Image (tube, grey):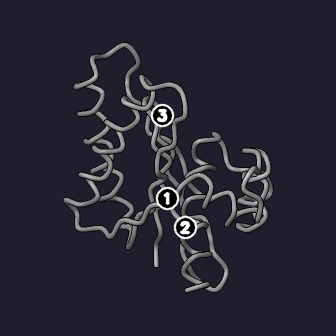
Amino acid sequence: MKVLGIDPGSGIIGFGLIDKAKNPKMLDAGVIKTTIGDETASRLLELYESMNELLSGMKPDVAVVEKLFFAQNVTTAMTVSQARGVILLALAEQKIPIYEYTPLQIKMAMTGYGKATKAQIQEMVRVQLKLKKKPSPDDAADALAVALTHMATLQVS
């Protein structure tokens, strides 16, 4: 089973594709970047087209998207929410089952500690996928953590 993890953002969206076998294996990871300075609608269209291209090429069996949590910055929350909506739309159109996890659930699944740092999570991604170095950029590593969280949840279920 191919699991696509997605770390939504307003300008940079991380993705990571993992093959869920006995030992998970990273198949691909990277980011989608939208054009800074463009109008919001243009950036959302750019994201939508990039997501469709990505999904067509990867053909994931399931997708896992990080849920949003913003305590203070409402403006950032709104733009990321719009991008997240476009991502969910693209996945739904291609009939890809969608799962969602909060940052706390991801931290707990990856490290067993709800206040883990980004560096700790990224190190666990490196270890679990048996990589020589942590995936880069950080958004891609975060997306892989989202996918690994789903795999860990499936093993518990």
Percent coordinates x, y for residue 94 in the rendering:
22, 63
Reading the chain from its start, which is encountered first: label 1 or label 2?
1
Write down the residue under mark 2: 18
Q: Residue furthest top?
A: 37
* Residue at the image position 29 percent from the left and 45 percent from the top: 85
* Residue at the image position 30 percent from the left and 67 percent from the top: 96
Give neighbour class at mark 3: few <14, some 14-19, many 20+ (Cα, 10 Å): many
* Residue at the image position 25 percent from the left and 41 percent from the top: 49
Seen in the picture, residue 18 relative to 70 is either above or below; the reply is below
Seen in the picture, residue 46 relative to 100 is either above or below; the reply is above
Nearer to us: label 1 or label 2? 1
Q: Do the CB atoms of the residues marked 1 and 2 lie less than 8 Å apart?
A: yes
Write down the residue under mark 3: 12
Judged left or right of residue 81, residue 92 is left
Q: How many marks?
A: 3
Percent coordinates x, y for residue 63 in the rendering:
41, 64
Q: Quadrant of the C terminus?
A: bottom right
Q: CA distance from mark 3 to mark 2?
A: 20 Å
Nearer to us: label 3 or label 2? 3
Q: CA distance from mark 1 to mark 2?
A: 8 Å
Q: Secondary structure at mark 3?
A: strand
Q: Residue furthest left?
A: 93
Reading the chain from its start, which is encountered first: label 3 or label 2?
3
Q: Amino acid at mark 2?
A: Ile
Q: Secondary structure at mark 1?
A: strand
Q: Do the CB atoms of the residues marked 1 and 3 lie less than 8 Å apart?
A: no
Q: Amino acid at mark 3?
A: Ile
* Residue at the image position 46 percent from the left and 79 percent from the top: 1
Q: Amino acid at mark 1?
A: Gly
Q: Secondary structure at mark 2?
A: strand
Write down the residue under mark 1: 5
Seen in the picture, residue 108 relative to 81 is either above or below; the reply is below
